[in-house]
Image (tube, helix red, strand yellow):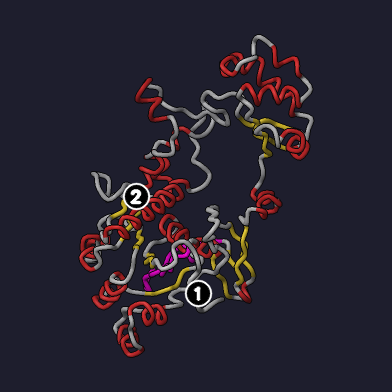
Amino acid sequence: MNHTLPAAPGALTGVTVLDLSRVLAGPYAAQMLADLGATVVKIENPRDPDVSRGFPPYLTDGDEEFSAYYAQYNRGKLGLGIDLATPEGKDVLRDLVARADVLVENFRPGTMEKLGLGFESLHEINPRLVYAAISGYGQTGSRSRRPAFDNTAQAAGGMWSMNGYPGLPPVRVGVTIGDLSATLFAVVGVLAALRHAEATGEGQLVDVAQVDSILALTETAVVDYTVTGKVAQPAGNEHAWVRPYELFDCADGQVFFGAYTDKLWNASCELFGTPELVDDPEIDTMRKRFDADTYERRVKPIVAGWLKDHTKAELEALAGDVVPLTAVKTVGEVVDDPGTAERDMIVSADYGPLGTLRMFGQPIKLSATPATPARTANRFAEHTDSVLADLVGYDAARIAELRAAGALS
C-alpha cells in the first residue's frame, strides 16, 4: 500500500478538504472531491475509527485484510487520527481548519457544537471555510436530532411507499439511495459554496439532509399530489403513464423497451417486421398508446411478441442502436461489458500483497482536468505525521507531545 499520496492534478487542485465523516454519504462526497483533484484528509477517532473499515468484502493476505467497501469510498485520501474529545485534539483540528477550504461531516446535528467545533466556531477561525454537514433530517427543524440511516430517508422522504408492485407491500430501493442522493447534493453544494468563497472570501454552511434529498428524487409525485391529490403508489416496472416503457421477457432474460414516441414506435414496427401497425387506427398515436386499457389489450402483447423469441444480445444488435432497447444486466455483466471499459468506469488500485482492487470509476468526465479515481485508500491514521508537518507546520517534537497527550493516534 502507498505510504504517500501525491496531490492529484485536477479541477480542484489546491483545494484542501477535511473529511470527518463516516460510512458512506460524507466519505463518498469527499471522495468525489479527491477524484477531482482536492487534497482530502480523512480524520478518524483513534478510539472509534470509521466503522466501514469493518465492512465486507475484504482484500486479504494471510491474516491481514482491508475493506474494499472502505477503499472504494476513501480512495485518494490522506489518513489522520485525532481524538476530538481531548483539548489538544480540538486545537489540532482548529489549526487544520485555519488552512483548509472545506470540512465535511455527517454526525447527528449538535455533535460538533457539543465539541465546540460547530460551523459558527470554525467560521470565526476561517471565515472562508465551506462547512458541509450531511444528516438525516438536516440541521434545522423539529426532527433534526433524530438518528437516521438510508432506510430512514427512503421511508420519511416518500420513496419507499412508491417502490414495488401494486397490491404488495412497498419495497426499498435496492441501493442506499438516501446516502447516495445526499452525497451528490452535498458535492453540488460544496462546489457552489467554494465558488462563492473564492469570489467573496466568505464561507458558509452547506446543510444537506437525506430526507430532503430523497424527496427531491420523487419526480412527479409531489406535483401529482399538490395539483390533483393523487398519491403515488407502487407501479412495479411500469411508468405511471408513459407506455410502452417497462421490462419485457426475452429468450434469455429481460430487456427494457421504451419506444413510446411516435417516431420510435414507428421505427420499432419496421424493425420487427410489422410495418402495418404504423397505420393501425387504434394505436397509431402516442396518446392512444398511453391509454391504460389500450396498452394492456393491444400494445403490450405486440411488444411481448416482438421480443420473446430473441436473446438479449440479438435484440440489442437488431434494435439497440435505433430505439431504447436495453438488456437488463447483472453487475457482473456490467463490469465485464466492453462499453464499461470504454468509459473508464472500472478502475484498478494496487494494494501490494493484498492484491488489486477493481472498483467503479468516476462518472464525471472533464476534458481538460480529468479525474483520478484509480488510487488507494489510506490505512488508519497512515499520514498523521506528514499531514501535520506539511499542512500546519508541526515539528516532530510537537507531534510527539500531542501523541503523548492522547490527541493523536
Q: Secondary structure at mark 1?
A: loop
What amino acid is found at the position of numbered circle 2 in the picture?
Val
* Image coords of residue 172 (percent x, y): 49, 40
Which numbered circle lies on residue 117?
none
What percent of the width, then of the height, locates residue 281?
66, 9
Left or right of 229? Residue 127 is: left
Mark before the other along the chain sequence, 2 or 1: 1
Task: Report if residue 44 lies within the magenta region.
Answer: yes
- Name the spot of residue 189 as percent of width and height, x first: 36, 51
Residue 194, given in percent of the width and then of the height, sits at 35, 58
Task: Answer yes or no: is residue 9 visible.
Answer: yes
Q: Quadrant of residue 250?
A: top right
Give SS at disc 2: strand
Would you place residue 229 above or below residue 65 in this image?
above
The amino acid type found where label 1 is placed reads Leu
Of the numbered discs in the image, which one, if any, rests on residue 208?
2
Region in magenta: 37-56
CA gap, disc 2 to disc 1? 29 Å
Residue 108 shown left or right of residue 237 in the figure: left
Quadrant where the image shows the N terminus: bottom right
Splitting the image into 4 quarters, where does residue 39 fall?
bottom left
Check residue 131 for magenta coloring: no
The tag on residue 5 is 1
Q: Quadrant of residue 391?
A: bottom left
> Is there any visible trace of residue 54 in the rendered image?
no
Q: Residues within 10 Å of mark 1 (few under 14, many from 20)?
A: some
**Residue found at x 60% / y 24%:** 261
Please say if 261 is above or below 298: below
Nearer the camera: disc 2 or disc 1: 1
